[in-house]
Image (tube, rainbow, N blue to C red):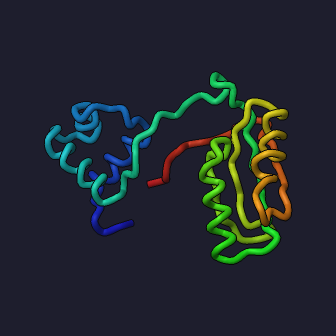
Amino acid sequence: MNNELDDTDLQILRTLQKNAKLTTKELADAVHLTPTPVFERQKRLERQGYILKYVAVLDPEKLQQGLLVFCKVKLKQINHEIADAFTRRIQRIPEVTACYNTSGAYDYLLMVRARDMKQYQEFILNKLGDIEHVGAIESTFVMSEVKQTHGINL
């Protein structure tokens, strides 16, 4: 672990991963300090880039985005220019909620949210299929979510 972080910093990070909506007082109570040093530590952790942002985790089913697909993409050829062009396009597609450059048989792993199979088909045909240099696509459909923590094991 990084030498700059002590046990209290790690406890603050663990607590915020579970509930980033805590007030400074609630966070201070959880880590057994007073609010002022907790506030200062939290701001330092933000400045130093340990805390990237705060988000609300939404229920995809309630928002009609219940279909989760892991989509593997193989490019026909790859170099810096082609990879940059691909990632710029992917950044602009709202159905893609995560994109990872991977090693192995495929170049990229996309996490895609859609309302249903029809919307996913439209995504493949009209968005991903329109990207130059896409050579192969393999889709894996999630039947049920077993675990998702949104956090890092500290």
Q: Nearer the viewer, residue 148 or 92?
A: 92
Who's the residue at 24% across and 35% down the image?
24
Q: Is residue 114 left or right of residue 5?
A: right
Give percent across and percent down for residue 91: 60, 53
Q: Residue 86 location, x and y as percent?
A: 68, 62
**Quadrant including the C terminus:** bottom left
Compared to residue 8, the image places residue 77 above or below, namely below
Q: Nearer the viewer, residue 30 or 90?
A: 90
**Callout count:** 0
Q: Residue furthest top?
A: 62
Instruction: Name the residue rendered at 82%, 70% in the picture.
Output: 76
The answer to which quarter of the image holds residue 62 is top right
- The answer to whether 133 is drawn above or below residue 78 in the figure is above
Q: Residue furthest bottom?
A: 79
x, y percent for residue 113: 69, 39
Location of the N terminus by quadrant is: bottom left
The reply, left or right, for residue 33 in relation to residue 103 is left
| Residue 67 versus residue 104 in the image, above or below | above
Residue 136 x/y as whole percent: 85, 61
Q: Residue at x 18, y 48 (%)?
A: 40
Residue at 84% x, 33% y: name it: 118
Of residues 33 and 118, the one nearer the viewer is 118
